Amino acid sequence: MTVQTAAPRPAPPTPPGGPAGRAPGRPSPAARLVAVLRGGLVQVLLTVVALVWLTPTAGLFVSSLRDADDNAGSGWWSALVHPGSLTFDNYSAILGDSGITQAFWNTVLISVPATAAVVVLAALAGYAFAWLEFPGRDWVFLVVVGMLVVPVQIGLLPVARLFGAVGLFGTTAGVVLFHVAYGLPFAIFLLRNYFAEIPREMLEAARMDGGSEWTIFRKLVLPVGRPAIASLAIFQFLWVWNDMLVALIFAGSDAQPLTVALQSQMRQFGANIDVLAPGAFLSLIVPLAVFFAFQRHFVEGVMAGSVK
Amino acid sequence: MKRTLVAATALCGLALATTACGGDTKTASDSGPAAGGQKLKGQTVTVAAVWTGVEQENFQKVLDGFTAKTGAKVAYVSTGDNFATVLGSKIEGGDSPDVAMVPQPGVLKEFAGKGWLQPLSPDVKGTAEKNYAKIWQTFGTVDGTYYGLYFKTSDKSTVWYSPQALETAGVQPPKTFAEMLDAARAVSDSGLPAFAVGGADGWTLTDWFENVYLSQAGPENYDKLTRHEIPWSDPTVVKALTTLSQLFGEDDLLAGGRKGALATSFPDSVAHVFGKSPKAGLVYEGDFVGGVISGDLGGKVGEDAKFFPFPSVDGGPAPVVGGGEAAVALKSGKNAKAAMELIAYLATPEAAGIWAKAGGFLSPNTKLDPASYADDTLRTAAKSLVDAGDTVRFDMSDQTPPAFGGTPGKGEWKILQDFLRDPSDPKATAAKLEAAAAKAYKG
Amino acid sequence: MSALTRNKVPSAPAGGTAPAAVRRRSRRARVTAIAFALPALALLGALVGYPILFSVGRSLFDASGDRFVGLDNYQEMFTDPASLKAVRNTAIWVVAAPAVLTGVGLVLAVLTEKIRWATAFKLLIFMPMAVSFLAAGITFRLVYDQDPQRGVMNAVAVAVHDAFNDSSAYPGARPRGTDVMKESGNGGFQAVAQAEPGKDVTLGLVGLPPASLPQQARPAAPAQVSDDAVTGVVYLDFVPGGGGTPGAVDPQERGLPQMAVELTKGGEVVATTTTGDDGSFRFPDAGDGPYGVRLPPKNFAEPYTGIDWLGPTLVTPAIIGAYLWIWTGFSMVLIGAGLSSLPRETLEAARMDGASEWQIFRRITVPLLAPVLGVVFVTLVINVMKVFDLVYIIAPGPVQEEANVLALQMWLVSFGGGNNQGLGSAIGVVLLLLVLPVMALNIRRFRRSSR
């Protein structure tokens, strides 16, 4: 991975006098008290921040477990006092709704191919940019670097017309292609830089052994690049999974993913929080699972993707 | 616009205001009674409409009737509220249904203009002439060709009230706008705010305006304004807005005041009146309010909820603003013959009767036996619609360019919401409406 | 911090020694290279490259695409009120959000270094990054809900407010018309007629649900009239089911107990009292009038309903708040990574010299972190310009225009009912122009690092 994570360096030996690390010259009890108090203050402050950060999600989650009447009649926090009224009915209702389950399935049908395609195409191109000679290579790569920050908005209209002309508009394939195209610059950039770190001797040795570029790519480059590919895949997957804008325009009615299906319910917000809350949570489950399962890769991916 | 596809399909975004871009596809069961003729056996007709949920189920019953009669399978596709967008993309994408239930005259006109529609067969036309008032045929006609058969209609001139609230306040259902204001004040004096207004949905406000305008300025001005032959800055518009401000201007008359009204969606506004803990006594919207009451709120229309016709304003005739869905046959469909058969079937009182019995449905079909309706309330609404004959006017905002009359956060919706926030200057509001209209009609 | 600063382009594979073989091999290699890169490049060219050119061209034509209008669309962007609002809001976003985020991230990153549960804390704050804007939007619609029974922000606001203010007994009560009483400012009411000892004051109010009257309320009765006292009655002037005479006390009408009443003379309050269970009040020992009788605002104060978070004025800050919730983790973690790579020796040396934590923070930490802060800031600027979903989801219909940003406006005018692809393309081009400096920066940095 080319990016540094938050792993702290080994801390220098702390002077006696506690982790607050005051100058050893002045270990007066008063100073120590101040330090402890200040440390306590930080603890309290960060605890409050943590609670504030947790509240919105907790609210959504608790709301998703209350029936429509309860949600209309009182705030979700009152359920904390009477947890008996909580129910999974909303979830069974939403899972019984063929529209929502279809949308969930559509999301998978969009995210998985879009992720796989980006990884494959970017790995191929990344290897070419790193280790294969072709005319104008460096210039083309600079253009790709420039494309890193191109906003998707610029592509919406022209690509919609393009897809319309070739019959891709409104199809899952169209949505996937769009995501792949706008995921590629970052993906190529990331993988090319990672592949470039592969020691030259390794590749030369493989070439001397008569391996074709395709074999080298498969047997050597891909395995070595696995960490970067993992970060890329996770990042791209979440990006596509969470997308609404692209799907809103390019997905037809039978191809719409969960985000679009849910936003169409937004109008009657107050009236159908019992659909929106579990729906939103349903859409959260996969990203959160990915997040907790691959924390490190995820953080790295997002950090590396920060230029996007 | 040359590349209509993008324009139309991309409109999916309208979903913000409306419901969904997508929906389920359900095939009518072919296990139904094989009683009637089976002349279309083995064929499949695809129908697209905006309906979802209960309405979809009820329409399905109507379609099942067709299956039983002809043996043809009917596949239903819901477009959600973005009818034009979704259908446009389906037609361009080569996945066109055979029949579509068009919800707005503007769309009917647009589709006809693009040459997407098959004129109705003489057979259907003949049935329609027998069964429908002339005005409903006119609504379905574009440039002299009859394309759309109005199957389902709505009466958007009904003011719903809680009988208990009016009784507590000691007032009777009013006949004039002035009486309605007095009644509203009496209700509000009794400690219950009078009107719930679903101001968060701009279309409820356009409907308010249209009723006042139709009654006060008369049908001719209404038609002219619809076609933008008179500007929105016209004195008649200012006057109608001033009339509305008598209601919107009094915080005490609105549930939650103006601020509350702006934060209230249409379903919430109905729930405010007919829900468990009433926050208001009356709510204005079309006959479909009844569906919300009996469906979502579990109330009994006719007992817990009644309506009176939108009262007359300044001595004009009481307004009847209608809406509805017209069945059209699409040229790009694969099964033209069965499509026309289905439309002919929809023109019969028999088809209308199936949905009428299920509720939440009004038919412009004069041959439909009023006894078919599920309840007295609907029967009354149906009667007023049929009796109004040629004075019925179609919902104006459905006929204007969508950028003006059909887009959340824009045009008429937005400006009337601003007006609800601060109704003190009708003239300025009219000027803003004209500016927005001028732009939309030009584009 | 991004990957682009720290990699070297490998120098081209070394040339061989046997020219013919090499040439053959290099031709084959070239074919292979193109086969490897072509699929990706073709896609990029068709779906990223071509759209840029197309948009630039399309932006010079009108809505229908038939008429060349030059720069009119760009001009309209800055004159049409809705688009102008979007331009302004985007400016607010770009100025406020990245700065606040970088600041908050920096503070949290520094503070987390001092706690043991830093990893858990970072994970928690970072979690919203995994969540879609849609889910975050739904979450925050709930957080900001106007109804204190639903929205947690307003629940807190109301709780705080009510802790410092008493609630009133008769919110919403008001006189019928303005003949008997008039608004006296701040929501109180003033009797129109002047009061004299020996004359009875009858003050009827309406607008209260009869069921909401206090239990002890009894049928209204005026106090005993006497020559040296101002007396009167405050009652609910409403009979369920109608009937009754407005302005007069009817038998079924009940008094309003515990209503504060003020007696004024020349505008000054000279006495106060509260009504009895039958609504009567009495100011004994009043000298000659004329007096005024007033029902002060505290009787009627509407219950506080909280802050209009998603109203026209606060909607943009509110949405930026939701954005902070999502992105703080990002800036905190990036800055935290930078912090952990600072030279400890410098910090320790400063501590030895007796510098305070604040001085260390300001004089050493921040300057050393400047490059990281810069990257975070620039990244956020780019992301903020593209914010779409969050605004679209959180802003309710009536205030969508007030919350509008360029990325949303682009979508609205091209797809969401506007159908003006000319203007839409122009907005897209402007969005692209706004990120051009960053694009140039990226390319320059990359070329420098690969040299």
Image (tube, rainbow, N blue to C red):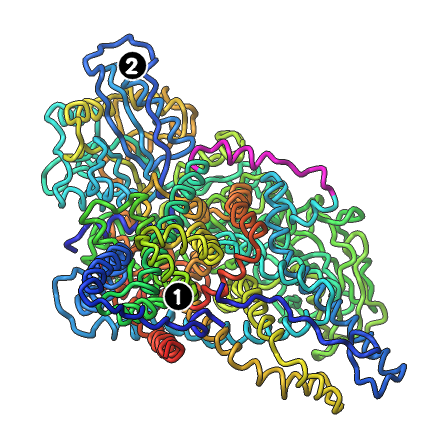
Residue sitting at x 41%, y 52%: A240
What is the secondary structure assignment of the residue under circle 1? helix
Q: Are marks 1 and 2 on the same chain?
A: no
Chain ID at mark 1: A
Q: Which of the two residues, B173 or B17, is positioned nearer the viewer here?
A: B17
Residue A99, by quadrant, is top left
Q: Residue A89 magenta-drawn? A: yes
Question: How far from the left and from the top, in percent, is residue C248?
Answer: 66, 53
Residue C47 shows in this picture: no
Under mark 2, the amino acid is: Ala
Q: Which one is closest to the eye, mark 1 or mark 2? A: 1
Question: How far from the left and from the top, in percent, is residue C353?
Answer: 74, 91
What is the secondary structure assignment of the residue under circle 2? helix
Residue A72, by quadrant, is top right
> Which residue lies under the disc numbered 2?
B68
Q: Which of the two residues, C144 or B129, is positioned nearer the viewer here?
A: C144
Under mark 1, the amino acid is: Arg
On residue C241, the disc is none
On residue A200, the disc is 1
Question: How far from the left and from the top, in percent, is residue B429?
Answer: 35, 65
Total number of numbered discs in the rendering: 2
From which residue to which does the magenta span run? Answer: A82-99
Q: Residues within 10 Å of mark 1 (few under 14, many from 20)?
A: some
